[in-house]
Amino acid sequence: MSPQRPPPPALLAPGAASHGAYAPGRDQRLPAVDDRLVAPESRAEIVDGRVYRTMGANPPHATQHAEVTHVFAGVLASGYSVAVDMLTRADADSDAAPDVSIFPSAADGQTGGRQLEEIAFEVLDTERLAHATDKVEKFAKRGVRRLFAVKVASRTVYEWNHEHHDWTALDPSQEIVDRCFRVPLPVAALLDRVLADDTVARALLAARNRVLEDALAAREARGEARGEARGEARGEARGARRSLAASVLRVLERRGVAVDEAERARVLDCDAMETLALWLDRAATAESTRDVFDG
């Protein structure tokens, strides 16, 4: 992405909406996130009033875009959508597009347009991490809750630290737990196709995907390795439940919420994926275990 001279008239979106919306935690009025400075599909972005031309990519940069989108789309929780290269109006002088955005599917209650993304993701090839920082800082100020970047060359995933205004490298063994995701997302799954497929499969099982359930039922009906099919299905289901239960306890531990032995056993012994998913959502903001179990 390279800076250009001020935009020609063709870059200006005709009839752009003029309604505004308040950004979380800020006093000044900002444009709506879907109020354009540049015409969609013009392959341009504006950051601090400067026009940047966005170019097509070659592998491995281009293929990494697809890999990241694949795993994000596969694990999305109900009520969320994913988009690629979707323009977001960050402020009066900035209209830029993250490589991947995850945002609520419902319309914004104030503007009637789309809501601000909760997660944004940048993919970098040979560029320095600093190249993404200016744009990411704009999104952070606008109120994007979580921002990530992946460096293709070094196979490293970073998360933006809002408190320190800098990037933090994530360990590949870590999991990204978030209300936007149906199951925890291993950091390594953003870099490894096999792990990405496994993660998506766990999400589909947790969602009781109709195709998977029909396939298992048909396999049993045909009598093809009936015992093996049941054992594999149960084993995968148990694995998914154990993973989800462990994530509930891990989130509570990281938040400093005390969990006694009876409560720990209640989580680990729970067989209902829907209940565990609900507890995981509550654990992200819980101040006590009562907030998790009683809502």
Image (tube, rainbow, N blue to C red):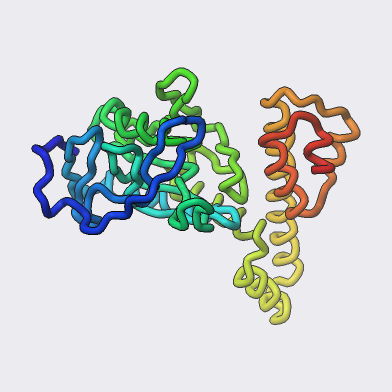
Quadrant assignment, res 261: top right
Quadrant assignment, res 250: top right
Residue 85, visible in the rendered structure: no
Picture quarter with the N terminus: top left
Picture quarter with the C terminus: top right
Give the residue drawn at x 22%, y 55%: 13
Q: What is the residue that sits farthest to the bottom in this orientation?
A: 222
Front in this rendered view, residue 246 or 180: 180
Front in this rendered view, residue 64 or 42: 42
Q: What is the residue that sits farthest to the right in this orientation?
A: 262
Q: Is residue 174 above or below residue 10?
A: above
Quadrant assignment, res 46: top left
Query: In the rendered view, does 117 fall on the left or right side of 292?
Result: left
Residue 283, visible in the rendered structure: yes
Front in this rendered view, residue 30 or 42: 30
Residue 194: image location, x then y, percent: 48, 50
Give the residue drawn at x 25%, y 36%: 47
Q: Is residue 203 above or below residue 91?
A: below
Query: In the rendered view, does 144 fall on the left or right side of 261?
Result: left
Q: Is residue 204 above or below residue 239?
A: below
Residue 60: image location, x then y, percent: 27, 45
Query: In the rendered view, does 266 fall on the left or right side of 124?
Result: right
Residue 73: image location, x then y, percent: 48, 55
Q: What is the residue that sits farthest to the top in this orientation?
A: 164
Give the residue drawn at x 68%, y 43%: 281
Residue 175: image location, x then y, percent: 57, 36
Give the residue drawn at x 76%, y 26%: 257
- Total number of numbered labels? 0
